[in-house]
Every structure is written in structure tokens, then in C-alpha cells.
């Protein structure tokens, strides 16, 4: 939608609302009418101030795209989020204007809705102001402020102090596809319910009971849910996040995923012993290179992997392979009926590194889409369960992934593949590992994979400011406080280098925590159904806080804002952001402690490949990146793709709309996430099917020496 048309519609809605509230009407409460009038006038003020700002972005944001066919960068994303907020306000304003005289009109509820989106609009205005600073301070076409550390400090400071609860209550997930909002509501309710009982000394059953008792109030009171979620995302420790994210390891969740994704003939967990490997050199196969087992932090140790194959193929039921299996006797899935025919080895092999911020999850968490990939691509999937931070910080995970990659090349015949084509695939942290493993393969002189499919990869593991990183202030799945905890853990800031147990199991470590979360998810699912059957259920008719309490909270936020202006609790003058006169974002009563990524390891090219010199990137296989327009890591993908393209490296970038970070893990939830997963599969299919990917791309260089974007 043209932004001028949108702002014109907003102005009309505000004028209509003011005339209705100020004119003779049958409003049930004068106090509610005054609240609504104040809110509409503030929205109108923000809209008038934002229209020229948006016009400025629209005039220039195409300069930051990967190319003309791939519109996508953090500036576009911020404008898109603002437009989504304005559309919700316009829709609600029109509803109020047309229905205020109805007997079923709930004045207090609609006033609260407008107030929530007014607060969100105010905070988005602040984000767009910060984005203006980035455009002014960064080089032309650059999305990251890699040299202006003062600006990055300001970004962290603003995140720490700005009010964010409005984005987690009534406005939760407004920027994403509407089909995702029930899912996000369940996740947030589960998290705040679990967070309330997290520090209490209770048995597993007791924590489940407490979580069930507390989750109901977060359903009927969105403001309480938002403020509690803000507290949790800002100040709870890494162990909380690890235990929460590992809900996907639970038996019930994985069982449901297996039902949804369909059966496979092979699903084996294997343990690779730490023995040296010898691989032929890519330049001269008559010579070999020795690859040592992973040794960082606690010395040589085994590497755990999972083999998934839709069809039973030659070698996958061999005694040689089953000797690596952790299961004794062999799993049921390997005891096939006599009429099941072994298929020949596939010419393709997919090696997968899972996401989870380097701190959580395993191949089991991602099994739902790996099963689909194996079926649709007709290839076995070799997924690596690398060591997680903070117990196993960099470079342990990279060493284990590289060792597993080398082992797979040497033993592809056991995996049901001839490995004529090898593709690396991963999401988020896994996408980072796909790139760095390939860099390590080039550095070691051995065969590099034939291509990489990286979904929303993390290529810059710093808190450097970028427009898409500003989305961490409103993103319920990837807040900046959580992101920095993950990055610092991987860098070893919170390293606890102890020898892991021989049979380390996420389920054993977090069984009690996931049991609590299962109860919360059940409660959340019930709330979905009730909200569809009875739309008034989520309206807040049964409130735990009175109107007086809500007014007190608003006064506290206002007082906090004035205190910041006066210097009470304000950041140092050098880090202070100067907003337009008469405007200041809402400040949070719950200050976040965000530790910037200052460890030198973060800028190691094998940690942040976006910072790698050209000699470490030249020779990479074709890289296919699938990013989301509403992901805080979008600019990582855009800038890395640009860097490879400008070097003459084969690369493609696809930006899918309206989805959050981590969409592969919910690929079967909505049509939009399913479509995004299909795009990832298509990119892997291109890698497998092209005959000679790298030379073909190099032959198509344009006169300036830049490789065309043909993947």
C-alpha cells in the first residue's frame, strides 16, 4: 500500500474518532471517552510526524537491497512493521466509529486496544528515529555500523531502557502473518507461566501445577502478560532459556512432529569415536590430509549425529554402521519386513547443522522438517548434534561439525550415499556453521561441499547496530537480551568447560522443565479453542487489575520518561539519543542488563564470517540464503550475500515475507511457513541437480567481474 494513502486513511480515522467522541454520543463512561480521545489525538500526532520520515525511507531503502529483484533490508522491514501497526489502528478506529452505539460495544476493551497500539506506535517512532541515525552515519549501501561503536552502544542502551511490554500483550505478533498469532500467544503464555515458577523450589509435579494455575491470568490480562514477558526476556539467566527452548526435545512434541511429518525407514543416532581421519586433498587426490578429532576445551571426545532416511538404502543396515549406533539392540525402524527392498545408494548427501543460538536444541528438535527433506529430496540426512554453549563454546561446535563432515565424506557408503553431490544445510546458528565448516574445508585443502543452503544465518555475532537488529526490541522470539546471551555464551564469556557426560541427553537435563512447559502448552491450546468459540473470552472482561491500576501504570511510565529526560537513571551523555523536541519513547520500569559483545573472539572470521577477509571466502561453493523480512538477523543475510556477490562468488538470496526467525521449526504450522520450507528445499534441489555449479557461475561473470545472481 502506498504510504501516503495509508497516512491519509489514518488522518481520516482520527478525525472521525475525535468528532464522535467529542460530539453527543451515548458512551457508557465519560472516563473511557476521555481515554479514547487522548489516545486518538496522540496517534494523530505520531502519524503526522511519521509521514515525512517514512517518505524519506521509501526514497532511499532500495539502495540497501541485495538487487532489484530481491527487495529486502532492515529499513524496509521497519517501514513494513509500522504499516502493519497503522493498519491495525485504522481497522480498530473504523470499528469504533461504526459500532460505538451498539448494545454489544465494549467501550473499555476498545479503548484499551487503541491505547496498546498507540504505545506501540510511539515506540516504533523511536525505532525509526534510530534508523535515521543509521542511514546518516553508515556508508552508502551499508546496513551495519561496524566502526561507530558509540552508535552501537546507544542502540544497546535504548533497548535496555525502552518500554517493550506493549509489543507482548494486546499487540503480540501484529507484524507477522495472522495465522501465527495463536502460536505466539501460546509460546508467550507458556514462557511467562514457567518464568513465574522457575526460581521456586518445587518438584516437577508441583511446578506443573503452579504453571497451570498461573497461566490463566495471563490469558485474560494481556497487559500483565506483556509486562511479565518483558521482565523475563530482559533479566533471566541462560539456563532458563536453554530449558525453555528444549521443550522441542520432549517425547510428546517429537511424537506429534513425527506424526505430522510422516514415517521414515531409518532414524539412527550414532556416536563417532575421536580418531584421526585421512582425506584426499582436493588439489591432488594422491595426497592426503589428516583431520584430528575435536579437542577444544576438554580434549578429544566423540561426536553425536543422527541419520535420517525416508527409504532404506544400501549400507544403512550394515553391521559396520550399526556398530556406531547408541541403540542396543538396533532400533525397530531398522528391523524391516522381508518385503522392504533396499534402495541403491543416493548420489546425494545432505549434511545438516541445527539452529538454537549455539546454546540449545539438537537434531531431534528439527526432526520434523528433516524427515520431509529426506523424502522430498530422495537423499539421506546426516544431522550433527554438536556441543552446546556455554559448556562447549567456540571452537568446540565448529570442530565437531567439521569432523562430522569429514567422517561423512569418508564413510558415505555407510550412510546410503555415493556423495557425488554434498549439500550443507542449516538454520540460524546452523547456517553459520555451514559457512564456517566450508571455510575450514578450504583452509584444510580438502573437498568443499557442492553448495550451502543457509536459512536466516547468523553471520555477524556482535551487537553492532543495524536496522533489522532494531526489531529485537519488538520480536517475541528473538529479543536483544536473549540474542546477546547466546552470542556471549558462544564466545566463551560464560564458559564452564567441563567434561560432558558420556551419554549427554537434553531430555535428561531438562526433563522436569519441559514437563512444566507441556502443561502450559496444553493450557494455551485450550485457550485458542476457547477464543474461537467465544471471542469475548480474550477481551479482558474478567480483569485482575482495575482501571485505577492501569492508570497508575501509565503514570509510572510517564514519570519514568520525565525522569530520563531529567537525568534520573538516564544513560551517560555520550550514549544519549537525542529525539525530536517534544517526543520521547516510553521507558521501562524494568531496566535490562545487556552485555555488549566485546570479546575479541566474536570478530574471529570463523565466528562472524561477515568479517572474514576475501581470501577466506574466495572458493566457497554456491551459497543459497533464505531469509525472512521480519527477522532481526535479516541484515546479516543481505550484507553477507552482497559481500560474496561483490567478490564474484556464486550466491543467491531469497527473502520471504511476514515470518519470524526460526520459521523452519514451525514449517507445518501455516501455509506461509510451509511455503518458506519449500523454498529451502528447492534451493537444495538446485545444488544437487546442477552438474558443475562453481564453473558454470564463473563463466557467467559480467564484464565487471561480478558473478550473476543465478545461484
Image: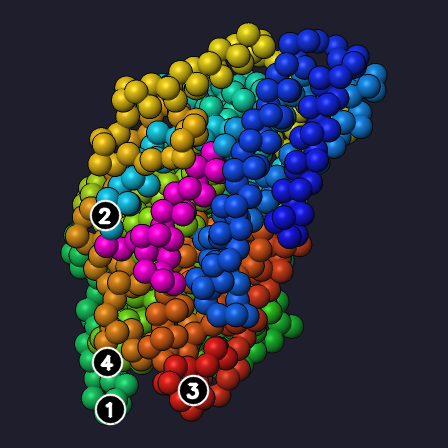
Q: Is residue 147 above or below residue 517?
A: below
**Disc 2 element:** helix
Q: Earlier in the sequence, mark 4 or mark 2?
A: 2
Q: Is residue 234 left or right of residue 338?
A: left
Q: Position of residue 72 (x, y in %)?
A: 50, 60
- Determine the residue positioned at 57% across, 66% down: 679
Q: Is residue 542 left or right of residue 65?
A: right
Q: Which residues are magenta?
A: 123-147
Label 4 vs label 3: CA separation? 29 Å
In space, the residues marked 4 and 1 are separated at their CA atoms by 9 Å
Q: Which mark is residue 382?
A: none
Q: Which of pointers 3 and 2 lies earlier in the amino acid sequence?
A: 2
Label 3 crowd (10 A; few <14 / some 14-19 / many >=20): few
- Mark 1 → mark 3, Cα distance in angstroms: 31 Å
Indicate which label's residue lies in the foreground, 4 or 3: 3
Q: Residues within 10 Å of mark 4 (few under 14, many from 20)?
A: some
Residue 149: assigned label: 2
Residue 284 marker: 1
Instruction: Answer with mark 4 or mark 3, whichever residue precedes in sequence.
Output: 4
Q: CA gap, disc 1 to disc 2?
A: 45 Å
Is residue 397 among the parts visible in the rendering? no
Location of residue 562 with respect to 651 vertically, above or below: above
Which numbered tag is attached to residue 445? Answer: 4
Q: Find disc 3 in the rendering and name its residue.
A: 702
Local crowd size for mark 1, using a 10 Å CA cut-off: few (<14), some (14–19), many (≥20): few
Please tell me whether residue 339 is drawn above or below residue 512 in the rendered image. Answer: below
Q: Nearer the viewer, residue 424 or 432?
A: 432
Amino acid at each position: 500500500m502506498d504510504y501516503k494513502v495509508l497516512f491519509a486513511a489514518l488522518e481520516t480515522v482520527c478525525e472521525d474518532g475525535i468528532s464522535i467522541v467529542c460530539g453527543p454520543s451515548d458512551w457508557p463512561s465519560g472516563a473511557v471517552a476521555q481515554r479514547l480521545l487522548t489516545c486518538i489525538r496522540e496517534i494523530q500526532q505520531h502519524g503526522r510526524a511519521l509521514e515525512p520520515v517514512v517518505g524519506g525511507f521509501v526514497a532511499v531503502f532500495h539502495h540497501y537491497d541485495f538487487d532489484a529483484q530481491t527487495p529486502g533490508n532492515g529499513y524496509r522491514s521497519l517501514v513494513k512493521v509500522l504499516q502493519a501497526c497503522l493498519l491495525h489502528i485504522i481497522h480498530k478506529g473504523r470499528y469504533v466509529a461504526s459500532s460505538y452505539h451498539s448494545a454489544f460495544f465494549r467501550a473499555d476493551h476498545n479503548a484499551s486496544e487503541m491505547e496498546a497500539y498507540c504505545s506501540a506506535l510511539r515506540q516504533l517512532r523511536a525505532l525509526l528515529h534510530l534508523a535515521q541515525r543509521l542511514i546518516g552515519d553508515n556508508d552508502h549501501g551499508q546496513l551495519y555500523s561496524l566502526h561507530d561503536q558509540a552508535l552501537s552502544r546507544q542502540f544497546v542502551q535504548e533497548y535496555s531502557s525502552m518500554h517493550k511490554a506493549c509489543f507482548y500483550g494486546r499487540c503480540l505478533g501484529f507484524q507477522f502473518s495472522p495465522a501465527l498469532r495463536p502460536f505466539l500467544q501460546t509460546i508467550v503464555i507458556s514462557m511467562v507461566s514457567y518464568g513465574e515458577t522457575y526460581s521456586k523450589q518445587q518438584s516437577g509435579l508441583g511446578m506443573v501445577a503452579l504453571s497451570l494455575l498461573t497461566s490463566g491470568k495471563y490469558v485474560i490480562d494481556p497487559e500483565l502478560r506483556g509486562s511479565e514477558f518483558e521482565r523475563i526476556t530482559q533479566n533471566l539467566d541462560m539456563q532458563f532459556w536453554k530449558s525453555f527452548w528444549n521443550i522441542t526435545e520432549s517425547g510428546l512434541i517429537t511424537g506429534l512432529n513425527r506424526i505430522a511429518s510422516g514415517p521414515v525407514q531409518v532414524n539412527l543416532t550414532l556416536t563417532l569415536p575421536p580418531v584421526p581421519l585421512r582425506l584426499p586433498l582436493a588439489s591432488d587426490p594422491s595426497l592426503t590430509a589428516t583431520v584430528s578429532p575435536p579437542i577444544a576445551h576438554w580434549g578429544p571426545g566423540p561426536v553425536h549425529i543422527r541419520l535420517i532416511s525416508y527409504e532404506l538404502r544400501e549400507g544403512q543396515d550394515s553391521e559396520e554402521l550399526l556398530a556406531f549406533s547408541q541403540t542396543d539392540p538396533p532400533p525397530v525402524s531398522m528391523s524391516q519386513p522381508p518385503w522392504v527392498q533396499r534402495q541403491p545408494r543416493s548420489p546425494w548427501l545432505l549434511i545438516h547443522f541445527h539452529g538454537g543460538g549455539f546454546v540449545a536444541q539438537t537434531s531431534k528438535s528439527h526432526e520434523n522438517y528433516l524427515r520431509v527433506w529426506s523424502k522430498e529430496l530422495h537423499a539421506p540426512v546426516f544431522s550433527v548434534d554438536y556441543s552446546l554453549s556455554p559448556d562447549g563454546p567456540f571452537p568446540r561446535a565448529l570442530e565437531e561439525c567439521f569432523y562430522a563432515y569429514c567422517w561423512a565424506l569418508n564413510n558415505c557408503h555407510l550412510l546410503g550415499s555415493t556423495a557425488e553431490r554434498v549439500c550443507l544445510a542449516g538454520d540460524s546458528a546452523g547456517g553459520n556453521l555451514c559457512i564456517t565448516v566450508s571455510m575450514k574445508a578450504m583452509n584444510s585443502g580438502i573437498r568443499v561441499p557442492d553448495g550451502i543452503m543457509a536459512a536466516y544465518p547468523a553471520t555477524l555475532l556482535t551487537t553492532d547496530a543495524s536496522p533489522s537488529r532494531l526489531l529485537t526490541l519488538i520480536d517475541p522470539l528473538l529479543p536483544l537480551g536473549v540474542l546477546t546471551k547466546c552470542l556471549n555464551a558462544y564466545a566463551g564469556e560464560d564458559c564452564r568447560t567441563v567434561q560432558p557426560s558420556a551419554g549427554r541427553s537434553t531430555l535428561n537435563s531438562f526433563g522436569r522443565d519441559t514437563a512444566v512447559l507441556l502443561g502450559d502448552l496444553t493450557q494455551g491450546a485450550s485457550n485458542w479453542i476457547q477464543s474461537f468459540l467465544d471471542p469475548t473470552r480474550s477481551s479482558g472482561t474478567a480483569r485482575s487489575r482495575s482501571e485505577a491500576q492501569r492508570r497508575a501504570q501509565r503514570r509510572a511510565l510517564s514519570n519514568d520518561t520525565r525522569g530520563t529526560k531529567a537525568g534520573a537513571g538516564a544513560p551517560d551523555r555520550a550514549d544519549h539519543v537525542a529525539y525530536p523536541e517534544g517526543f520521547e519513547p516510553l521507558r521501562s520500569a524494568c531496566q535490562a542488563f545487556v552485555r555488549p559483545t566485546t570479546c575479541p573472539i566474536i570478530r574471529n572470521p570463523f565466528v562472524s564470517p561477515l568479517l572474514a577477509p576475501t581470501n577466506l571466502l574466495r572458493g566457497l561453493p554456491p551459497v543459497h540464503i533464505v531469509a525472512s523480512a521480519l527477522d532481526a538477523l535479516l541484515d546479516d543475510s543481505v550484507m553477507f550475500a552482497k559481500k560474496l556477490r561483490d567478490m564474484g562468488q556464486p550466491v543467491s538470496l531469497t527473502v520471504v515475507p511476514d515470518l519470524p526467525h526460526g520459521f523452519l521449526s514451525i514449517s507445518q504450522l501455516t501455509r506461509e511457513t510451509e511455503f518458506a520450507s519449500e523454498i529451502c528445499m528447492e534451493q537444495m534441489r538446485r545444488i544437487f541437480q546442477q552438474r558443475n555449479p562453481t564453473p558454470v557461475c564463473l563463466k557467467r561473470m559480467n564484464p565487471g567481474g561480478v558473478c550473476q545472481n543465478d545461484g
